[in-house]
Image: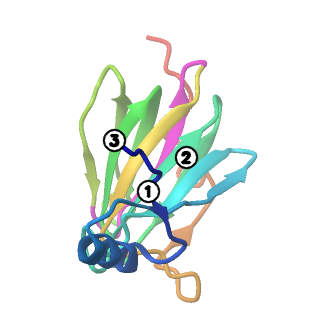
């Protein structure tokens, strides 16, 4: 038996998918990390394969980081904590209502966040936290469907650990 590496292609997944099917061969498409002082992300995973407009991303936040607040006008987010734990915050500015839930290894599930709700996440605990998320509209850098404000823009939301 001869063992080879899959064909490596640097092209969109939709093209690699067609190549794999037409050549009956596995294909590896490398991806790049985005990193800053808050953590790192793998963006645009499976773009165009799962949904023509959506994308799948995986983001890791370092301990003590709060990534908030932002909202979309078209896009719905589906968030699943896979590594560590995240306190997810969601805020309806029109009705002055907020929601909070800790998701992750010990509380698996998916949080669905429709527009135009503000949302964000804070790492809970001493380890990094990983978020797998599907968005219904791929990020468009020339016209982002994203509005941002500071993590403390809505007074009273407890991003910190609540000691009860």
Residue at 49 percent of width and 43 percent of height? 121
Q: Could you tell which of marks 2 and 3 lies nearer the N-terminus?
A: 3
| SS category of the residue bearing label 1 | loop
Q: Which residue is mark 2?
A: 155
Quarter occupied by residue 18: bottom left
Q: Residues under labels 3 and 1: Cα distance?
A: 15 Å
* Residue 146 spot, x, y in % from top left: 50, 73
* Residue 109 spot, x, y in % from top left: 24, 36
Q: Nearer the viewer, mark 2 or mark 1?
A: 1
Q: Nearer the viewer, mark 3 or mark 1?
A: 3
Residue at 53 percent of width and 52 percent of height? 154
Please report the bounds of the magenta region as a residue range.
114-126
Residue at 35 percent of width and 59 percent of height? 26
* The residue positioned farthest toward the front in the image shown: 1
* Residue 16 spot, x, y in % from top left: 39, 73
In the picture, the disc for residue 1 is 3
Q: Which residue is mark 1?
A: 6
Can residue 14 be seen at all in this image of the molecule? yes
């Amino acid at each position: 038996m001869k063992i080879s590496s899959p064909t490596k292609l640097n092209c969109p997944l939709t093209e690699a998918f067609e190549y794999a099917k037409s050549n009956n061969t596995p294909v590896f498409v490398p991806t790049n990390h985005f990193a800053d002082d808050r953590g790192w992300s793998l963006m645009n995973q499976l773009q165009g394969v799962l949904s023509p407009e959506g994308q799948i991303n995986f983001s890791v936040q370092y301990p003590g980081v709060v990534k908030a607040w932002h909202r979309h006008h078209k896009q719905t987010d589906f968030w699943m904590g896979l590594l560590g734990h995240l306190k997810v915050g969601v805020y309806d500015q029109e009705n002055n209502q907020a929601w909070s839930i800790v998701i992750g290894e010990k509380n698996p599930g998916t949080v669905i966040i429709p527009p135009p709700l503000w949302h964000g996440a804070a790492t809970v605990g001493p380890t990094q936290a990983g978020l797998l998320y599907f968005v219904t509209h791929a990020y468009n850098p020339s016209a982002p469907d994203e509005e941002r404000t500071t993590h403390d823009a809505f007074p009273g939301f407890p991003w910190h650990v609540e000691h009860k």
